[in-house]
Image (cartoon, rainbow, N blue to C red):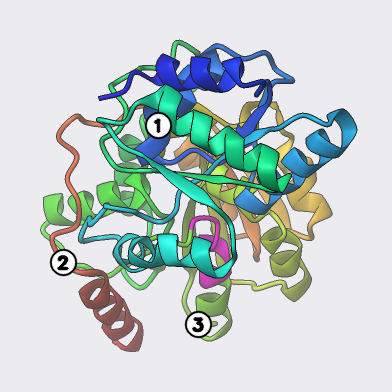
């Protein structure tokens, strides 16, 4: 395996001084190392990949220097059953690069970093255009981020989800965001000995709120609850004013805010510095609530139940999940069918 600092050092040696992108589980150790060893202006985690590329373009045209943009390729060599987009897109990533006429090199655990980067920068110099570094799964050795986020939160995400399931009504429809939120929600249904009934968003990070909007508009007699994350909201924040403009009275948008991309390694977001109340109200949400402990969650829930939507409910949580957190034992197709059956029931 390659130590993250090896690639980082080699990139710096070749003149790369600016890093930007969206964290991914395959790259989590490298991303964590970059975040710990770059200044605030030298590493910016963006809301989405398009933002990252645009930021790198701005950096390049302002400085004449090369930036490093990292992102997932939706799974080169990654075949997790619960995320089928990794399999399908992973198969065609090299072909996509060829089709787009973007030169690339592959980095794996047994690569000679210096040699691979020599080839990358030779192509950069020859073409004066982007070059892609495709990173295979298992390339990097483990590295844990040293950054700590200060928070008043006392609750873990799974504790919040457990409590929310007690507060919701049987006919409520739940849409959960990708990653650990959906995994924990699935486990809690098993724990409660309840059949699967929730829509577990697989892939499609940032789109849970839009999915919930669609469900709410065509199920106006039932309350729709979107269980979202701060990184997810940031990735496609444009969904908020769309929701606000349509005013679905039955939509509750719950944002579990731990200021981290926890599902892919715990890299920080900027959500601990954002005024989500101002954003929600400016976007047209009818009400905003915030809680950071169990008593607060229960108090807010009693109030928002009587409030017509769309309602924005921010719950501050701590980072962390159980070491043995599993993945849904049913397929995405089965989960979709279960949800659709529950909607019709």
- Residue 168 vertical position relative to residue 44 in the rendered view, above or below: below
Which one is earlier in the sequence, the residue at label 1 or at label 3? 1
**Which x, y percent locates residue 155?**
39, 28
On the rendered structure, is 24 left or right of 231? left
Residue at 49% across, 59% down: 226
Which of the 4 quarters of the picture holds residue 162?
A: top left
The magenta-colored residue range is: 205-212
Which of the 4 quarters of the picture holds residue 285?
A: bottom right
Q: How far apart are marks 1 and 2 (CA)?
A: 26 Å
Residue at 50% across, 49% down: 104
* Mark 1 neighbour class, 10 Å CA radius: few under 14, some 14 to 19, many 20 or more: many
The residue identified by callout 3 is 221
The residue identified by callout 2 is 330
Q: Magenta-highlighted stretch: main secondary structure?
A: helix
On the rendered structure, is 148 left or right of 198? right
The residue identified by callout 1 is 28
């Amino acid at each position: 395996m390659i130590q993250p600092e090896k690639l980082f050092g080699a990139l710096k040696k070749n003149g790369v001084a600016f890093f930007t992108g969206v964290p991914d589980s395959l790259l989590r150790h490298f991303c964590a190392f970059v975040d710990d060893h770059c200044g605030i202006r030298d590493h910016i985690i963006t809301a989405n990949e398009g933002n990252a590329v645009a930021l790198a373009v701005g950096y390049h045209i302002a400085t004449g220097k090369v930036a490093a943009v990292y992102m997932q390729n939706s799974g080169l060599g990654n075949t997790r059953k619960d995320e089928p987009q990794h399999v399908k897109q992973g198969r065609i990533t090299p072909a996509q690069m060829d089709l787009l006429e973007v030169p690339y090199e592959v980095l794996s655990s047994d690569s000679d970093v210096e040699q691979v980067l020599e080839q990358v920068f030779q192509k950069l110099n020859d073409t004066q255009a982007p070059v892609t570094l495709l990173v295979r799964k298992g390339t990097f050795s483990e590295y844990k981020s040293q950054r700590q986020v200060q928070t008043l939160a006392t609750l873990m995400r799974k504790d919040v989800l457990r409590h929310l399931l007690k507060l919701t009504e049987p006919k409520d429809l739940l849409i959960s965001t990708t990653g650990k939120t959906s995994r924990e929600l699935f486990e809690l249904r098993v724990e409660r000995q309840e059949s699967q009934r929730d829509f577990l968003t697989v892939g499609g990070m940032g789109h849970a709120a839009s999915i919930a909007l669609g469900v709410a508009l065509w199920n106006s007699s039932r309350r729709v609850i979107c269980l979202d994350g701060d990184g997810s909201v940031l990735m496609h924040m444009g969904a908020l004013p769309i929701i606000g403009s349509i005013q679905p009275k039955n939509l509750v948008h719950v944002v579990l805010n731990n200021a981290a991309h926890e599902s892919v390694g715990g890299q920080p977001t900027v959500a601990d510095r954002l005024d989500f109340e101002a954003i929600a109200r400016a976007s047209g949400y009818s009400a905003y609530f915030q809680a950071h402990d169990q008593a607060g969650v229960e108090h807010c829930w009693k109030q928002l139940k009587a409030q017509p939507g769309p309602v924005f409910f921010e719950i501050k949580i701590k980072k962390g999940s159980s070491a043995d957190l599993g993945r849904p034992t049913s397929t995405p197709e089965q989960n979709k069918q279960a949800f659709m059956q529950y909607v019709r029931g």
